[in-house]
Image (tube, rainbow, N blue to C red):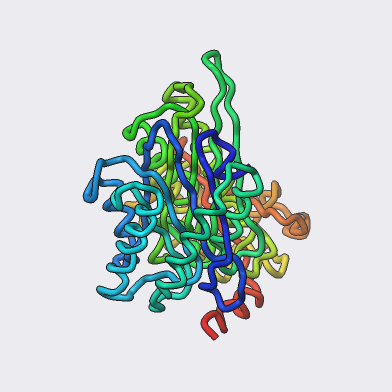
Amino acid sequence: MSVTAAKGFRAAGIRAGLKHSGKPDLALVVNDGPLDVAAGVFTTNRFIAAPAVWSREVIAGRHGRPGSARAVIVNSGSANACTGARGVADAAATAEHLAGLLDADAGEILVCSTGVIGVPIDMPVLLEGAGAAMRALAASQRAGHDAAEAIMTTDTVAKEDAVTVAGADGAWTIGGMIKGVGMLAPGMATMLCVITTDAVVDASAAERALSAAAARTVNRINSDGCMSTNDTVLLLASGASGTTPSPEAFDAAVAEVLARLGRRLVADAEGATHDIAITVSGATTEAAAEAAARTVSASNLLKCAVAGADPNWGRVLSQLGTVPEDVCPFDPDAVDVAINGTTIFRHGGPGDDPDLVDMSPREIRIDIDLSAGDARATVWTNDLTHGYVTINGDYTT
């Protein structure tokens, strides 16, 4: 169900001692080949963390062959963001140390970190933990789950998934793990994510599939409007199945797994009691639909209303109305809004009785029809509760 579902991968998750809580805090995923294909999508935050910079450079070929990697190491004890020259050196030293253990080059090692910003990594503990993680490596489902647990911060559950695709030429698998429950906003929605596949694909196919999938899945999550410094989504391909999927099949499978993993982020968002899917249809373009849905998803008033089981369509419309006309053209008098299937605003005026809306399900669907075109897009968010404030009010204390 995780990063070890695909052939050719081993993983480990251990307690290295980076977290004061004593919880698992160091994960390792190793690609045993025969291929070493890698692709990545990274945060657009200008204060990008040193590990994300290093991994982006590895994918780009700044430290070796472009589009290739042998392993990824993830620590959840420190973000290693905004740590200056020391943080840059620590990221490189982590790659060099693991490369030595794997008899590889530093340019074949991807590095990820998550935790509190501005806190340097305890490098002696991390490097010793890397050796322990190497000794714990296994291709078992348990090992994959251990890795998924080791990348958690304020997550309450490990998040992992996998699918196997059977075709005329044989079967192949794609699986992955993801973490993130706060600072969830594009681009990308904050996360660390490692996806593995045993399909036979090249670097260009991996990059194409990952970029397209991220744009329509994890990049359409907006939990709290806060972008992380460390966002990283990685795709590793071993080719161990011996099966070469069609581009269409591969793209679809990557998108399916990433969408499933993204939904797990929303379901575990900090303090959330409802998952909210905001779908804008009838837009002139997909970009316009996404812009409108993203704008509505940013309304704290709407999120509070959902937390209180209040189908307050006024909060949908007031937020929708802030989208610039040149970004998303529509006639306000032609708009419909439905919540969980009940159309409570219809063509410029009140629709069905809001008391008919069932707000009890965990999943709340807000459907907005602009009647301006044929394009549509969905952005996921969640409600805003006291729990979110409690978690983030003492995050570093």
Quadrant of residue 283 within the rendered picture: top left
Please say if 363 is above or below 67: below
Q: Nearer the viewer, residue 348 or 146?
A: 146
Q: Nearer the viewer, residue 118 or 212?
A: 118
Please say if 31 is above or below 345: above
Residue at 67% of width from left, 54% of height from top? 364
Q: Position of residue 113 (x, y in %)?
A: 43, 64
Q: Residue furthest left?
A: 62
The reply, left or right, for residue 152 in relation to residue 37 is: right
Q: Position of residue 74 (x, y in %)?
A: 46, 59
Residue at 50% of width from left, 62% of height from top? 184
Question: Would residue 348 be seen by someone viewing this image from the given angle?
Answer: no
The reply, left or right, for residue 80 in relation to residue 397 is: left
Q: Nearer the viewer, residue 9 or 279?
A: 9
Residue at 58% of width from left, 66% of height from top? 15
The quadrant of the rendering that contains the C terminus is bottom right
Quadrant of residue 393 within the rendered picture: bottom right
Q: Residue furthest bottom?
A: 397
Q: Position of residue 297 (x, y in %)?
A: 52, 60
Question: Would residue 138 be seen by someone viewing this image from the given angle?
Answer: yes
Residue at 59% of width from left, 21% of height from top? 166
Q: Position of residue 211 (x, y in %)?
A: 38, 42
